[in-house]
Amino acid sequence: MKKYLLFILSVFIPLLSFAQETQEVGIDQKIDQAFQPISDFFSAIVFFPVAGTPFVLILLVASAAFFTIYFGFPNIRFFWRAIQTVRGKYEDIEKHGAAELYGEDGIAQGQDLSNVDIEEHIENLDVDDNLAIDGDIVDTIRDESSAGEVSHFQALATAVSGTVGNGNIAGVALAIALGGPGATFWMIVCGLLGMSTKFVECTLGVQYRDVGEDGTVYGGPMYYLTKGLKAKGFATLGKIAAVVFAVFCIGGSFGGGNAAQSNQATIVLKEMFNMTSAASGFIVGIVLAIIVGIIIIGGIKRIAQVTEKVVPFMAIMYVVACLYIILSNFTLIDDAVALIVKEAFNPTAIGVGGFIGVLLVGFKRAAFSNEAGAGSASIAHSAVRTKYSASEGLVALLEPFIDTVLICTMTALVIIIFNFGGAFQYGGDGLGAVMIGGESFEGAGITAKAFAEYIPYSDVFLTIAVVLFAVSTMISWSYYGLQSWKFLFGRGKVADLVYKLLFLTFVVVGASASMNSIWAFSDAMIFAMVFPNMVGLFFLFPVVKKQLTRYLNAIKLKEQAIE
């Protein structure tokens, strides 16, 4: 580790000196000018309108509503069950596969379950080697139980680190700056609906995953599109959709999961260290790329080890700060909530475009933040150790709740309470920037000003938070993108290295380019993933229903045995 730190310093110090000497138009602006046309091109294609509304948002919200109703509001009914699964309460049935032994209906055919030894029952089963129970070969039940690389908690932490990022700090600020307080209401609605979508796609991610000879797990929409649609008789459609998804997922890993994160980290670092040179963004990007590069070399196990420690600390630290500000202004909470509800249906933000405009701003920022419907999180969840795919689907539905309903809402309340003093005008310049004290602020800069109003030295605190959010998101998304890259180009070491070099390049691009171009490109790539992913979800949601029943019956069987 020391040699890595020395290497970082050896690169950073000369570059910093060079940047401070370079005051003319420099590399940051050149990178931004080169990247802007690319951003505009993809944004125009992905967000094509239907009746004045981007079709991808209609698809996303309508699908989430459908899954919520079809599965009987799983975001509410199975919330506690999901928490219990993360805690490991049902770990024993996931190891042994109780439901396969006793039938999918959870009835043990009149046997007394209190003294049943499932391990012994596996050994004594007198069946043909080719006999399958509920689609599983009996002799492989124990082998399948060990498939996977990480625990439920580690999978959740890895996936949450990919969603809980600067979308919660900068994205919320952007939503409120553009759409006013009402955007918060629609972010919450989108987050609650997104819990159902996340449940469906992550169940499928585990159900159709591949496990390599070395135990490495390969999963996500690429695999449930190819395998699942082939089983339904649509092999060609599945292959095409899988390839399209993989391409967009790689783009998403370069954009929303990478460049947008380094962009916001750079904003707060430049502000904190007063870096004004024309190459300061490029310098910060180089340093971030080195740090991220050191981490992502280790793969999903290294990522899981890092995220299971960093994410809880990062989230708790940020939430405590938000709660401190909110509770310090307790008398304003009801006013803030009332304003959120009122502005959701009767927005006054300049340039937002009325009710539809604020709704779209809220949905867009929420979907970008929690990624429900994009399918990306199912890649991380696929690596879990379990026999029941629906178990991880239930775990996954906690993500949008943590990300959007909790953390995004807290950020929004902090900013709204801060603005009760008239710090800035909602709507701003129409691009996400607002004037505070005669200076222009955007994204994380707005949140930083709100924090500074209530917490001494909060510039240091928020800078640390933003950088931690950014790095954890980038390392998780590097895994998502790499899995897609391997799906397209093979699992060799050369392909692996090429992707990681490209990924680290976009860390630098994001740090150098402007917020507008980076976030437009990031939005386009994340939302583009929705199109091929939804093909798989609508073909395969009956499979999810069956797997949910299978898992719940296994739990019921265990509970009967205990009784």
Image (tube, helix red, strand yellow):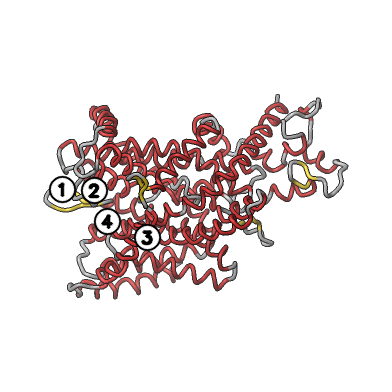
x, y percent for residue 156:
51, 46
Q: Which of 85 and 405 is in front in this view?
A: 405
Task: Kindly indicate whether the residue at mark 3 contacts the one at mark 1 (C-beta within 8 angstroms).
Answer: no
Left or right: 481 with respect to 329? right
Left or right: 97 with respect to 494? right
Secondary structure beneath label 3: helix
Task: Kindly indicate whether the residue at mark 1 contacts the one at mark 2 (C-beta within 8 angstroms).
Answer: yes
Does label 2 or label 4 sit earlier along the sequence? 4
Between disc 3 and disc 4, the foreground one is: 3
Which residue is pictured at 61% across the width and 58% down the height?
A: 236
Say what amino acid the circle numbered 1 marks: Ile
- Residue wearing tag 1: 436
- Mark 1 vs mark 3, CA separation in Å: 32 Å
- Mark 2 vs mark 1, CA separation in Å: 8 Å
Vertical side of 2 occupied by 390: above or below: above
Q: Specify the label residue 268 is tagged with.
A: 4
- Mark 2 vs mark 3, CA separation in Å: 27 Å
Say what amino acid the circle numbered 4 marks: Val
- Residue wearing tag 2: 446
- Mark 2 vs mark 4, CA separation in Å: 10 Å
x, y percent for residue 120:
82, 40
Task: Kindly indicate whether the residue at mark 4 contacts the one at mark 2 (C-beta within 8 angstroms).
Answer: no
Q: Specify the label residue 42 is tagged with.
A: 3
Q: Which of 269 and 507 is in front in this view?
A: 507
Q: How crowded is mark 3: few (under 14 residues within 10 Å), some or many (20 or more)?
A: some
Does label 2 or label 1 sit earlier along the sequence? 1
Secondary structure beneath label 1: strand
